[in-house]
Amino acid sequence: MAVGTGSNLNRQRMINLMYIVFIAMMALNVSPEVLDGFSKVEGELRQATAASEAQNGRLASDMQAAFSTNPAKASVYYKQSQELQRRTDSLYQHLQQLKEAIAIEADGRGASPDSLQHRDNLSAASVVLLAPIHPKGKELRKHLNSYTSWVGSLLKSSNSEGKILSRLSTPEGREGKTWEEECFESMPAIAAITQLTQLQNSLRYVEGETLSELLRSIGASDYHSNKLTAQVIPDSRIILRGVPYQAAIVLSSIDTTKHPKIYLQGNALPSSSAGRVSLATPSTGTFPIKGHIEAELNDGTIVRSPFESSYTVIEPTATIAPKMMNVLYAGIDNPIQIAVPGIPLQDITATSSSGSLIRKGDLWIAHPTKAGSEVIISVTANVGGKSQPVAQTKLRVRSLPDPMPYLSISMGSGSTRFKGGRIAKSSLLASGGVRAALDDSFLDINYSVLHFQLLAFDALGNALPESSQGANFSDRQIRLIQNTPHGRRLFITDIIARGPDGVERRLPSLELIIA
């Protein structure tokens, strides 16, 4: 790299894991270590971006000097550099506004993305960037594509165009997802802000590289020969334990015909390494990495440029969450979301200790067979070509709860569930029969009524039972309702319903008074 402090783009997706529980409770188990890791990376990215801005400022000064020295030769490139800085600053500010909007959505008015309180908020990024009415993520993608297209026109004669612009690419996601859905859907607020900070860092990197290319185009590349800056560019700053730390150590504005000497932790790297380093990661924590680069300038002067950085190693972790609640139900399909920070979904595998567990799109479907037991979900990830266990979670297996019977009564533009009391004969007949459902709008399970009995009493107290082999009133039941005088009582008894688990259940009776 010629200029900048660019940290490799580290798009990490954290899936929004919602427990829809029987009492409408929602929770997510995201380890504090992972959130702390994102906070540290975001802070270091801001520091790296500030260093890039300072370096880009020096490049802009060199461009101004080149224009002042030779306006005829530098005029075109100078104007392009001015427009480049204007567009870059505008897009940078747009990214900053998105970060502030996410912080406000997560923490409330007056919040700052630099000191986020609710780092694990799972809705803020989606509300800001993926809203259906004003999708700011789609707008951001268009801005990035427009910017890279314009910068590409400046770099069309450069061999580094593809490498430089890849830092701001917006490829489509898997299974028809857009770039913004792939990057920000169901992502914790701190991860989304880190992603936007990474884009700001990449933006300054592209600005610096483009300024360097423009300077080279007018023969001004010597302006930085006495202001060399060493850089450590890791492939990732957050690493799973056991996965090697990999990084490139480079010198800004280096002459590609020369090979600087690189010293890491006091030891010289082989010239064949091309500035690449790989370190073992046997334990977790934050580790420093420092050294210096020695390079020869055009006048023969040896310049020693120190570098210093750090990397964070975290324990492998995964999040496993049933979509309906924090338990599984026997005999039915239970959708589950499984995610490992920093690992693509296609590189994640999962198994169940009981029943079946299969992938379906971005979800997994668990189908346990026995209630009253526990199921262990085990997750492994393909990391560096090797399968590595990352997490196990125990989930309870329960039987589906019994539903409650009701009559569906039309009310204006909607309907209501009538569960007993005074009812007009016309409303009773219009209901069509008996239905059954759970008294929980968050657990959407369909039950089928197989049988029920309608019971009335005549003036002498004799019982008049009529049965239906299904959910709807039989013809004899309809006549019984029509012949029941006002003020008399009807009873719906012997109600049998079956759920998707195949279990038949006897439900409580309904008592009706004909109004």
Image: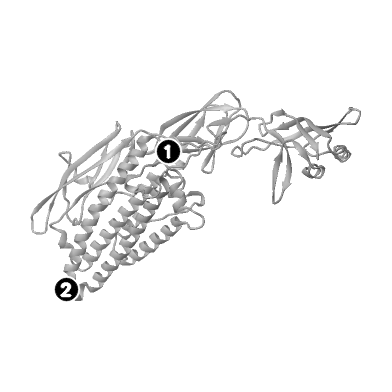
Q: Secondary structure at mark 1?
A: loop
The extreme right residue here reads 460
Q: Viewer-proximal residue, 234 or 80?
A: 80
Which residue was labeled with disc 2? Answer: 70
Which residue lies at the image location 27% right of the left edge and 62% below the top edge?
210
**Which residue appears at 23% of the width and 61% of the height?**
212
Looking at the rendered image, the quarter that the C terminus falls into is: top right
Q: Nearer the viewer, residue 23 or 31?
A: 23
* Residue lying at the far bottom of the rendered structure: 72
Q: Examine the image and state in which quarter residue 286 appears.
A: top left
In this rendering, position of residue 372 left or right of residue 108: right
Is residue 46 visible in this depiction of the protein? Answer: yes
Between residues 175 and 515, which one lies in front from this camera angle? 515
Q: Residue 92's x, y, as percent?
A: 33, 58
Crowd around label 2: few <14 · some 14–19 · many ≥20 (10 Å): few
Kindly identify the amino acid type of the residue bearing the numbered disc 2.
Answer: Asn
Side of 433 where 258 appears, left or right: left
Residue 227's quadrant in the figure?
bottom left
Dot 2: element: loop
Whether residue 210 is situated above or below residue 264 in the rendered picture: below
Does residue 171 lie above or below 65 as drawn? above
The location of residue 42, given as percent across then percent down, is 31, 46
Q: Earlier in the sequence, mark 1 or mark 2?
A: 2
Question: Mark on residue 340?
Answer: 1
Q: Residues within 10 Å of mark 1 (few under 14, many from 20)?
A: many
Q: CA distance from mark 1 to mark 2?
A: 55 Å
Tell me if residue 4 can be seen.
no
User: What's the colour scheme?
Assistant: one colour
